[in-house]
Each structure stands twice: as C-alpha cells, then as structure tokens.
Amino acid sequence: MSRGRERHGKLAGMAAVPSPSPAPVTLVVGEEEYLVDRSVRERLAVAREYLAASAFVASEGSGGDVHEIEGGELTPGELATLTSPSLFGGGAVVVIRNAQNAVKDVAAEIARYAGAPAPDAVVILAHAGGAKGKALVTDLKKAGAAIVEHPKVTRIGERAQFVKAEFRRVSRQADEGAVQALLDALGSDLRELASAVDQLSSDTEGRIDARVVSRYYRGRAEASGFSVADHAVEGRLSEALEQLRWALATGTSPVLITSALATGVRLLGRVGAAPRNANANALAAEVGAPPWKIDVVRRQLRGWEPAGVARAIRAVAEADAAVKGESVSAGYALERAIRRIVASRTGR
C-alpha cells in the first residue's frame, strides 16, 4: 500500500474521492466533528473495498476484520494484536476514535507502528485537535502517516464555501442565492447543511437557485436568525419582531439568533469603517464575508452612525448574556435587543 500525506484546508478535499489504495495509517484531525467523522467513514469504506479485492483476505468480498475502539480504551500491545493477521489470513481495518485520549505509552506505540505498519492492515485515527494529544499528531506526521485536517469552520464566508463544496461533491450546480438561502434557513450546522444539499440534489433537477431552496425550507428560511437580523439593522421593527416570534415558535435556537444579530451589527461596524471606495472583494476577504454581502451591508448602513452601531453592539452583547442564562426569558431579551438596535439606527 502506498504511503503519503494528505493535507486538507478548512474546506479542501470535501469533494475529493479517496485513493483506491489507502495509506496504511491515516490521521483525521480537526475540531469539525461532522467532517472528521465523515472522513473516517469514507476511508473505512475504501479500506474495506481494497482489502476485499486484495490477496490479504481469506474469502473474496469479506473486506477483512473491522475493529473500532476508543483511544482512551486502547491498552499497550493491543494495537499489535488488532493489526495482526488472523488464523484465516484476513486483513484488518482498525479505527481509533478520539485518539487524543490515548495514554502516553499507547500514543508512543501508535507512532512507532506508523513508522513500520503491517502490510495487511489499515489504521485510521480520529483526533479532535487542540492541545490534548498534540504530540501524537506531531509524531504521526514525522512517521509519514497520511494527514487529513478539518479545522473549525467559523466565518460566514467559510460556511458558504462549505455549501458550494457540498454541491460540487454531488456534481450539482447552485447559484449564490441558493447558497445564501440554505445558510439563512439552516444556520451554521454543517451536518444539516450537507444533508440539505443531498436532499436537494436527489429531489430536484437542473440548476438550484433560491426559489428551489425556498420550496423545501420556506418556513425555516423566512424565520432564520439572519432574516431577523437583516430586518433589525434595516430599521424594520415590526417585521423583525414578527420573524423573531416565528423563528422561536419553529424551534430556532435563541443562541443562533443572537449570533446572527451580532454578525449583522458587527458587519455594519467593519464595513462602515472601511473607505467607501474599498473594493468589495478585498473587503469581503478582510471581514470574512462573501462579496455580495458587502453590497447588502453598504445598503443597510444608510441611517447608521458610529455611535449608533456602538449602542447596537452593546445591546446584542447584553442579549447574548441573557439568552445564555442571565435571563428567565430568552424571547424577551431578544425582543428588547431588537428594539434597541432599531432605536440605535434612528438615533432615538
């Protein structure tokens, strides 16, 4: 089996097809739990297919033995046992979840194994990233293990790129409006976004636009946190409150709504502070938003002054604290924040 290193950025590789000849040891590392889990499952399937077609298995199509174990439960010497050939000559696939929890001796054993892996076994490790177990990541890189990285997807622009990559993954075309409509409807949950792309790709034909998305997610799209935020920063109080009540009634998390309000108000501040003739693409890269959003924010800035933006930011910060436990009514806290945002825009 070939050995190598496979590096993924935040979004790179989401549409990649794994090699039919998997690396003997692969480390999937990152804070995006959904992407890490999906990468592990994809590589497990490829490894089983490879072993089923190889001379390592006793019966054609068996795919070898599959062992899944938690890193914290792996004991010294156990990896060697799991990767050893069975009496019937079958290959093996070992999946180690939460490898960051492996004790020091076991982590060292894993690193040594990566330097001289068994010829008839595939080992796939999932690591949550962060400081815990960081030495194992470093040691596996040095040993030549294949590395797949999935850092946290945090910015609006990164989530939009994720959705676009998901559409490419299923070989479908979607315009910017469709991407934004999905983000408005579903928020930041990558698992939900990926599932929505799969559903749209299987249930529709042709190019996917905002109207197609709206048919499937009308209630959620119209009552999302971002819709509430847009109405608020544009000074449309009654519409903002109506959308807020509908969003809460349909199960939208108050935390997601405050996050959307915070994003909307902060973009006002950052775009408003930039030179008026600043290039939209360059400014988008600086603030972490898609270029089309810069044009939207520039229109929303009419009626805003720096002091008003500062008051709105304070209102959102207080609402955020309230919905996270400092208030008995998240709905009241959000309604109060929206009223203060609208008042800040008009200067009252």
Image (cartoon, helix red, strand yellow):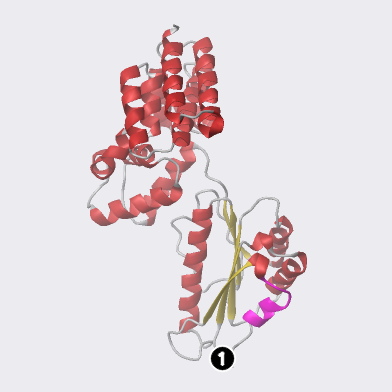
The correct choice, above or below, for 99 with respect to 347 in the image is below
Mark yes or no: residue 39 visible. yes
Q: Position of residue 208 (x, y in %)?
A: 27, 45
The residue at the point 48 percent across, 32 percent down is 259
Q: Which residue is mark 1?
A: 89
Q: Residues within 10 Å of mark 1 (few under 14, many from 20)?
A: some
Examine the image and state in which quarter residue 24 appears. Answer: bottom right
Residue 243 lies in the magenta-colored region: no
The residue at the point 71 percent across, 57 percent down is 133
The correct choice, above or below, for 165 with respect to 102 in the image is above
Position of the N terminus, as image quadrant, is: bottom right
Q: Nearer the viewer, residue 311 or 297?
A: 311
Q: Which residues are magenta?
A: 74-82
| In-image side of 246 versus 132 (left or right) | left
Q: Position of residue 254 (x, y in %)?
A: 45, 34
Q: Amino acid at mark 1?
A: Gly
Mark yes or no: residue 177 visible. no
